[in-house]
Image (tube, rainbow, N blue to C red):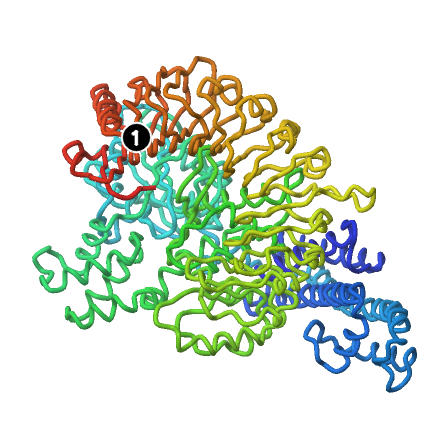
Amino acid sequence: MAAYAALLSLRHIIEQIQHHPRPPISLDQNQVQSLTDNLNFLQKFLEHGYPCVGSSREAIDVFESRIADAAHAAEDIIETWVVDQILAESTAQASKTETWVCDQILGGSRKTKNTRMQDHLCRILSTFCGAGSSRSPSTRQNVVAGLDVVEKISSVDLYRDLDKVIQDMGLIKKDVMEIKESNIGIEDHLHMNPSSLAGAASSRSPLTTKQETMVGFDELLIEVMDKLTGQQSNLRIIPIVGMGGIGKTTLARNSYAKPLIVHHFDVRAWVTISQHYNVQDILIEILLCVSKYESREILSGKSEGELSERVHKSLWGRRYLIVMDDIWSIEVWDRVQIFFPDNGQGSRVMITTRLSNVVFQLIGSHGLVMDFLNEYKSWELLRKSIFEKKEDCPFELEEIGKKIAKNCKGLPLSIVVIGGLLAKSKPTREYWEYISENLNSIVHLEENERCLKVLHLSYNHLPVHLKPCFLYMGVFPEDKNIRVSWLVKVWVCEGFLKSISGKSLEAAAREYLEDLCDRNLILVHQRGLNGGIKFCKIHDLVRELCLREAEKEKFIYVRRPHDLNIPQGIINTRRRISIHQSASEKEYLPQARHALECMPLARSLIVGRQGVLPSLNYFRLLRVLNAVDKYLNDHVFSLEAVFQLVNSRFIAITSDRDQNADFPSSINLLWNLQTLIVKERDAFAPSEIWKMTQLRHVQFNQLEMPDPPLDGKDEYVLGNLRTLSRIRNFKCGEEVVKRIPNINKLQISYHEQFDGCSSYCLDNLVRLHKLESFGCFFFTWNRPNRDDVLRNFILPNSLKKLTLHRTNLYWEDMKTKIGLLPNLQVLKLKANSFVGTEWETVEGQFCNLKFLQICDCSDLERWTTESAHFPRLEQLDLRHLDRLEEIPSDIGEIPTLQSIRVQYCSKTAVISARRILDEQEEFDNVGLRVRVVARNIKHFESLASPNFQVGVIWMN
């Protein structure tokens, strides 16, 4: 929610100013204490919900809006003064004070639009310079002296402005305390299901309801039936898990109503739990299902103890099936499981839930996971939802019908809603094409937005600290595979993460993402070799939920395609703006660009649309500039302009290669910069970069960094720095190692004349004890000396990922330099990193290696190894090995091996890969996959099979 995010953001700002080694402004400590006390109180209030009753959702929204407005007001005051102070001091230090002062007074500069500052400067000129003499050379000293007065006056105004906000927060705090004491005024709507305020089990047995159409889950249905009727005599729990609308309840109902199940169990009961449950009502529903002689009126008058005893007696000695639909927490199971006797009759309890962690707590595994339907099954479900028989669908509608089904992205709920709409209309191609072109808006409106209501329950159930993370996912375009390392960086810089004791903000962000995935709101697209999420994505319908909630809570503005104008209310309130590419929108760009020029409070700008971004001068308070996108190849930025965004925390841009390669020294003005990503640019950093203590991640095409200053002054340690990529001609001297003690990822490259590893102090790499990912690339015309590399190229045992390019080591050197690294999981050997015709491995090395890539090691002909030499290898990737005679057959015997990829290698190597696959399939190892890319696929078409894919382009 916006209020909670605003409180956390303000807290982070205060902490950064308090703990920064060179804060741009000073805050009064009494005010800091007052702000912190108010923040703590309001944060706990939002975290624990609203325990009082009597108010509407609208009243709650107004109350939260007051909290957000107060936090934003404090944020605006502090950050405006920060920007003004930094730019003012910078200009004065550059010996341009007089020009700057006059520019401010005359309105000739956009560096500050602070009218108070202009008034102060006017008084300074009249006091120190005399009327009409402001541009006299003799006035420079007086003007500089006058800036001290400006700072003192500014501090008074800062104190006064913050004091007003503190008073406003105090009034909000007072109102909260009065509400709590009187127990009236605010209702617990944040964590309540609006459709089930009674908090009771809400459904009777589905025996009396129409059985829903189920398509595409036949195998799961068979698996459920097997588990229900299995020979195990003990009580078993059968969980079904998946996102809202995926078909969990439909699957449960279809199995529940099968004649085989009806006859197999003596009694059956169905109860829907929902987010707020009542144990007494659950017991009543069970009794009503298992006994036709019970009445709700009589049962409602009995205590929970009496009801639990009757349930236990009714189930004892009988084979029973209990379905608990829509469970949201493990607590409900802990409350009711004692009522279900394990009497050795083969009874079962079937549970449906959206929360994977609930299933894991119940049975210690993932249960039955429901996934999206493929295109074929989606069409089958849509067709059956419209027509009773296959032949009822007109032939001319099949193509457009399949397109509609495909665009539902495999979510059964969405398909059924559209199917119901089409079933009620005349089947004409014109109407179906209209549905296809307007699918998203129709799904959102049909049946009173049934789809979004189902998914909204998941959002309501989120703890408050996860809601900002979830809503932020709406800034990404549809169908985008989101790189998690990038997402984590942005979340941290946005300032809405709640820290976890003893963990970095990055670690907290990854935990929050895992939690959202466990709740089946965010989808895991790809996991890395360490098991962490590498790419994630979001279903279109869930993204729509993000956008609607974010818009309602004024959290983010995402411009929809063809939005001609941005409403004035959004211009004045939104702090996060996202605009992405859309086809045929050129005519809308001027309006969009003009609207952006009118958003002075914007803190985040995510742009994926070429030509839409106006001058950066309009965004003085910007924290996040994310303008790296495949559609922005021609949209380049001047580093000089970007480095005027002194409030920035995250900058990701494409810069002009033709510009001066030197960094402007103004980089030092970015006092709080955490992430700097610059594409398509080689650059030279000034020494001031060593003073940027907040830096976490620096990524360039090529960046040359100077040695740290050795004058004994300004010895800053970049303790937050985790990533340096790619650093050109990196000198890893003692001073450098001392300044980057926590570096986690380092990529370095050497060009032109290479003077040897000892000259660049590469033996100091071993002192980087937290280094996990390291890449070393030589692009020099002279080869590195092997003896020099062996003697001085020493790697730390902490390494998990290693990439080498043109190190020119011998294969036998692998035993001493790399094979013994205990934590190494990923090894990428690029062009001529190792030379020689034969590689023979030995046992006891590569203990944890999971991914091995050998690319452009053109000398390699023979590779001798055994399966025990790579005990945990999962993926083998071979590229451009023209002389390799074969892949060792023992590779196929590695029990963990999942895939072999062969790209542009010798014909005999490809044939050996086919032989390895055949041998493994003979031993029923059907999990191995081989993918081949060749210049002439005709040579290998005869080898193709479902597990042996052949193509002309590389398949990731």
Is 837 situated above or below 154? above
Q: Which residue occupies the foreground of this view, 937 or 603?
A: 937
- 328 or 234, nearer to the observer: 328
Residue 579 is situated, as x and y percent measured from the top left of the image, at 47, 66
The residue depicted at 48 percent of the width and 60 percent of the height is 475
- Residue 286 seen in render: no
Q: In this orientation, which residue lies closer to the viewer: 826 or 430?
A: 826
**Drawn side of residue 226 relative to residue 389, left or right:** right
* Image quadrant assignment for residue 84: bottom right
> Disc count in the image?
1
Residue 832, how many percent across, how many down? 43, 30
Q: Residue furthest top?
A: 843
Q: Specify whether 468 is left or right of 689.
A: left
Q: Residue furthest left?
A: 391
Quarter of the rendering containing residue 290? top left
Point 25% across, 41% down: residue: 255
Coordinates of residue 26 in the picture (x, y in percent): 82, 59
Judging depth in this view, the residue of 55 and 826 nearest the camera is 826
- Image side of residue 402 versus residue 663, left or right: left
Q: Identify the amino acid type marked 1.
A: Asp
Residue at image mark 1? 882
In the figure, 145 relative to 250: above or below?
below
Residue 189, position in %: x, y? Answer: 54, 59
Q: Quadrant of the N terminus?
A: bottom right
Kind of element beneath mark 1? loop
Residues packed near mark 1 inside 10 Å, few (<14), some (14 to 19) or many (20 plus)? some
Query: Which residue is found at the position 22% from the left and 26% from the top?
Result: 911
Query: Is residue 545 visible in this depiction of the protein?
Result: yes
Q: Quadrant of the C terminus?
A: top left
Q: Single out the residue that lies furthest toward the bottom.
A: 132
